[in-house]
Each structure stands twice: as structure tokens, then as C-alpha cells.
Amino acid sequence: MLNEKEYNQKLAEARHYLGERLNTMPELGIILGSGLGGFAQLIESKVVIPYREIPHFPVSTVVGHAGQLVFGQVQGKRVVAMQGRFHYYEGYNMGEVTFPVRVMQVLGATGLIVTNAAGGINPSYRPGDLVLIKDHINFIGDNPLRGENLSSLGPRFPDLSEGYDLEWRQKALHMAREIGVHPQEGIYAAMSGPSYETPAEIRHLRAIGADLVGMSTVPEVIVANHGGMRVLGISCVTNMAAGILPQKLSHAEVMETAERIEKQFVRFVQTIVGVI
């Protein structure tokens, strides 16, 4: 559970460490999911800082997550990109999972693009599709705001009725058409993992309206909204969820599909950064 005084002290120490190494502070944060870290190559005038060097930062343990912050500019915007995120299933608590988003907030970032590799539940999806998240369902079984409220960063009971910014989503859809990308829109369900969902669980998720399923994103989005950040969520459908197709699931398939679509994904996010 959160302890406001201790957590704020950790944030202050991380901010001080990063502030001494940066010439300018970011205005936009970007979280790069499994196999999607190649976007960081576009960042100009970059400063790369491994997670292990930042006070109180967790360390990525998942294949496909480089484990570093990349500061710099994209399309004239000051950005900080996370090459690799933290997951609840790795054993971290919610305060640790979302610590990087809090650090972005205290550095001055007011917006967040969050990406992930997800399993497709909607039968109209295909591996390789990009999906703009319009809402989510939290089945992780925990909430990053549980415990003392970080009153200096946000309210006790934040509103999530537009957790994914509608204006940013509309801009992303408009720009996608201009560059020949055709993203879908959908509702993302977050599970705790690390085991993939059973076919019965997928049938349940589909029945309650979920289009996608994964093991991340929702904690970061909750915290970003609590801190007043605008959020755009993008999923890469890397496989169809259990029971949708007669096949077994593997992380290797996730990485293979992410690698195949990475160029299109990078171009899409680069274009979005220029218009939001």
C-alpha cells in the first residue's frame, strides 16, 4: 500500500537524479510495449538512462523490454520513452509498476501514449492489427491508487469516464487515414498474468464487451488520469486469444508479430506525436 510521504521522497530523489542529467524536461511520455521498442530509434538529441541507474526504479525482466528511459525530441516535441515496462506479474506492487508514470508527471509531462502487445478477442481482428483503446476493464485484482492518496498529484476519487482522450483518438484516426494505416478501436481487458487466459475466461471477457486482452496498461492509465495527464492507448494485436483460433499461445509468437508490424507501428506513433 502507498505511503504518501515515503513515495513522494522516492519521486523527489528520482526527479533530482534525472534533472541533473537533462537539459530540458519532457512534455510527453511514451510507454513502448513488448517488441515495440524500436520507436526509440527515432528520438533525436537523445539521452539514454538505464532503469538500474535511476533511484527506486524497478528493472524489466521480460524478453523484448530493453529497460531504459530515452529522452529527446520527436516531431518537435520533448518526449521520454520507456523501452520496456513493469508488470504486476513480475512480482512488483502497483506503486512500483506505475512509478515511471509518476516520475514523468513530476518531470512535467502532461500527456502519455501507452502501447502494448495484446491478444485479440474481437473476431474481426487479425494478428498485426493496430487498435486504439477507447476504454478498459480492470481484472488485475488491484488498483494503483489503493492506500494513501498522493494528494499533491491528484484527487482521492479520479474520474475515468474518458480515461482515453477522445480528441487525441480522433486525431490519431484522421492521421492514420492520411498515411494509409487502418487502426480499429476497442476495449482492452487487463488480467494479472503471467499465464495466458483460458478459453472460458476469453468467452467471459467477450461476453462483457472486451475486444482485447493483455497484462499491462491499465495501471499506468489509471495513474496518468489521476495525475491529470491526457492518454492515448494503442494495442498491437500480436495473437488471437485462447479459443478464438485452434492454436496454442506463446510469447515467441507475440514477439514475432510485433517485429513484423514494428515499422508500421513506429510510423503511426511518430505521426501521432506530431499532431497531439
Image (cartoon, rainbow, N blue to C red):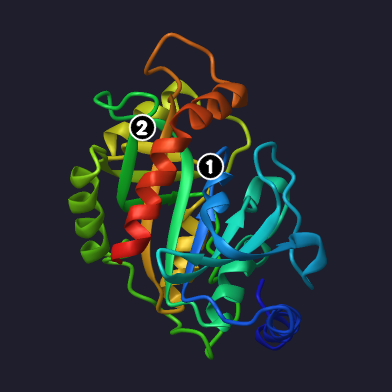
Q: In the rendered image of this protein, does residue 75 appear above or below residue 205?
A: below
Find residue 200 and report its horizontal and vertical position in percent.
Answer: 42, 24
Which three-letter amino acid code belongs to the residue tagged 1? Answer: Leu
Residue 189 visible from this viewpoint: no
Identity of the residue drawn at 22% across and 62% down:
166
233 sits to left or right of 247: left
Alpha carbon separation for disc pair 1 and 2: 29 Å
Q: Is residue 215 left or right of residue 179?
A: right
- The residue singled out by tag 1 in the image is 36
Please name whichever residue, 243 or 27, is drawn nearer the observer in this view of the structure: 27
The quarter of the rendered structure image containing the N terminus is bottom right
Looking at the picture, does residue 32 appear above or below residue 275?
above
Q: Residue at x 60, y 81 (%)?
A: 148
Q: Residues within 10 Å of mark 1 (few under 14, many from 20)?
A: many
Give SS at disc 2.
helix
Can residue 56 be seen at all in this image of the molecule? yes
What residue sits right under mark 2 in the picture?
204
**Of the residues shown, which amino acid type is indicated by label 2?**
His
- Identify the mark nearer the N-term, 1 or 2: 1
Identify the image quadrant of the C terminus: bottom left
Residue visible at 61% across and 75% down in the picture: 103
Position of residue 261 relative to residue 109, above or below, is above
- Decide which of 21, 148 is in the foreground and name it: 21
